[in-house]
Image (tube, rainbow, N blue to C red):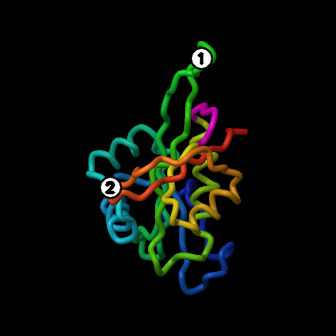
Amino acid sequence: MGTDKNSKPMNDTLGMPNKPVIIRKCTEEDLDGVMQVNLNELPEDYPYFFYKSLLDNFGDAFLVACDQEGKVVGYIMWRVEKVPSVDEFKIYKKGHLVSIAVSKDYRRLGIATTLLTMSMKEIKKYGIDEYVLEVRVSNTPAISLYKKFNFSIHSIKYAYYRDGENAYYMIRKAD
């Protein structure tokens, strides 16, 4: 895994000698691990075919963080949405951050920042005009992370989540 040309060893960068982590493109074999991280860390869950579809269609921007044994400890996945302009005859492409999660024992080590940095470069290759995402209004750490990446709150989606919590809709123009 660590010798793969698409892998980036993170242990030096993040200063975690007892928890080395590799960031690389997700594979089909990783999907069970991705689903387990999602199940453990987020209230939202998706069926297998949803993950597989994102991997098949936007695999360059579907990244995983793996520990030294190859266990998935974090992931990020995107999709591209085509939407018509309201004031022009043009179709815009939005890179939509579908989900990002890091296992509790691996948080606050820079993994989410690295996943976001690397995946934004990859999703941009799909010709997007802007990045978009939804985040729970109560998720202060995630909102702070997104603001560091120059995302701004565009609007509120009321009762967006299954449990009724609102979401901030955040955007950032693609450079």
Q: Residue furthest bottom?
A: 18
Q: Are marks 2 and 1 in contact (CB under 8 Å)?
A: no
Q: Percent x, y for residue 89?
A: 59, 13
Query: Disc 2 residue type?
Result: Arg
Residue 127 highlighted magenta (yes or no)? yes
Residue 87 highlighted magenta (yes or no)? no
Q: CA distance from mark 2 to mark 1?
A: 33 Å
Residue at horizontal 33 percent and vertical 61 percent from the top: 35
The label on residue 29 is: none
Residue 9 falls in image quadrant: bottom right
Residue at horizontal 40 percent and vertical 45 percent from the top: 55
From the viewer's perspective, is 164 left or right of 82? left
Identify the main secondary structure in magenta. loop
Residue marked by disc 1: 90
Residue 14 falls in image quadrant: bottom right
Residue at horizontal 40 percent and vertical 71 percent from the top: 71
From which residue to which does the magenta span run?
126-131
How packed mark 1 is, by other alpha carbons closer than 10 Å (few <14, some 14-19, many 20 or more), is few
Residue 8 falls in image quadrant: bottom right
- Helix, strand or loop at mark 1: loop
Vertical comparison of 59 with 33: above or below:
above
Q: Quadrant of the C terminus?
A: top right
From the viewer's perspective, is 7 left or right of 174? left
Residue marked by disc 2: 162
Query: Disc 1 residue type?
Result: Lys
- Helix, strand or loop at mark 2: loop
- In the rendered structure, which disc, 2 or 1, sits on the residue that comes first in sequence? 1
